[in-house]
Amino acid sequence: MQPTVLINQHRQTALVVAASGKKLLVVELLKGKLTVTALSAKDIERRGYHVSDYPPVQAAQAYLAHAAGVSERARGYLQEVVRGEFSGTLTFE
């Protein structure tokens, strides 16, 4: 699984960090805090997300510096991305 930055028409971003069964684990801003959410491909499509060419490492660094906070679970995934334990992009087929 490769981390991938997603963006929607409202310029909201999310970072795909892992897979869990048929769902993708996505770090996104919810209620003022960055948290991990499990989303199906349909959920991602419904939210209007599409793959961005923004580098996942840069997104993870920005998310880690988020002033409103980052959940511990999200922090762990983001630190893995920053450490380079992932590379490349995720392809939706």
Image: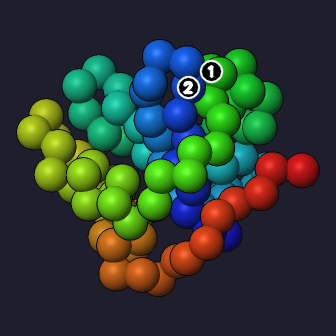
The residue drawn where x is 34% and y is 81% is: 83
Q: Which residue is the extreme one toward the right? A: 93
Asked if marks 2 and 1 touch (Cβ < 8 Å), the reply is yes
Q: State the residue at coordinates (48%, 52%).
A: 54
For residue 92, above or below residue 47: below
Q: Of the residues tagged 2 and 1, which is closer to the observer?
A: 2
Q: Is residue 58 left or right of residue 90?
A: left
Quarter of the view holding residue 41 = top right
Q: Which amino acid type is shown beneath numbered disc 1?
A: Arg
Q: Which mark is residue 47?
A: 1
Q: Secondary structure at mark 2?
A: loop
Relative to 35, does residue 12 appear above or below in the rendering? above
Q: Is residue 45 above or below residue 91?
A: above
If the image is split into quadrants, where does the N terminus sit? bottom right
Residue 92, position as x, y percentages in the image:
81, 50
**In the rendering, at what x and y percent does residue 30 appear?**
35, 26
Q: Which residue is mark 2?
A: 8
